[in-house]
Amino acid sequence: MSIPLEPYNLYTSDPVLRRSVEREGAGQANSALETFGERVGSAEVSEWGFQANRHSPELVTHDRFGERVDEVRYHPSYHRLMDLSVGAGLHASHYDGQPGDGSYVARTAQMHMISQIEVGHGCPVSMTGECCRRCASSRILPLCGSPGFEPVPMTHASSTQPPSQATCLVWA
């Protein structure tokens, strides 16, 4: 008979991760990382990961009237994982910190934990974190002026206070 892995705490059960967080200056985030590790290691979140992987995204090119829609439909568990990750600030929490304060290390530790449950949703979460940093540079925005792209202010680019110049691009 197999013994289920979950529930378990992905942070407290990983001594290498804990030591790395301390060594790299993010020890002040230990409590938050323990809470996140417990949530991510729950049976519920683990099941979301299995379901998101069991049900691949579906490309829908046309609606029922034959009109082109080019939509990708994801299983609800994928959306739950996205909500969990964004709710934890993984998309931009590192913008709230200062260089050397450990905020990027703490965010990376969270990405490490959630990726053990389901890695696919981590791609857009991590790209959002990089996109906002890159696009906030005025040198980048003129390069993105091709047809079909437009800058959109990011009112929620950070978990607590949005940077004043944060901008990302969306396909119009």
Image: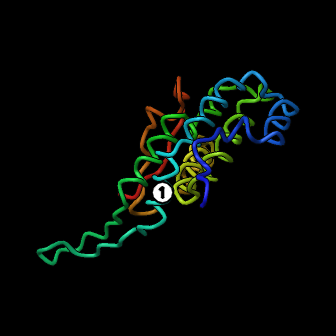
Q: Amino acid at mark 1?
A: Gly
Image-based side of 130 in relation to 152, left or right: right
Foreground pick, 171 / 52: 52
Q: Residue at x 52, y 50 (%)?
A: 46
Image-based side of 122 in relation to 58, left or right: right
> Furthest residue to the bottom?
66
> Furthest residue to the left?
65
- Mark 1: few, some, or many residues within 10 Å (few <14, many ≥20)? few
Residue where numbered disc 1 is placed? 145
Where residue 84 appears, x then y in whole percent?
A: 48, 40
Q: Residue at x 60, y 59 (%)?
A: 2
> Furthest residue to the right?
23
Image-based side of 126 in relation to 167, left or right: right
Q: Which colour style is shown? A: rainbow
SS assignment at label 1: loop
Q: Residue at x 15, y 78 (%)?
A: 66
Where residue 97 appears, x then y in whole percent?
A: 68, 26
Foreground pick, 19 / 143: 19
- Quadrant placement of the N terminus: bottom right
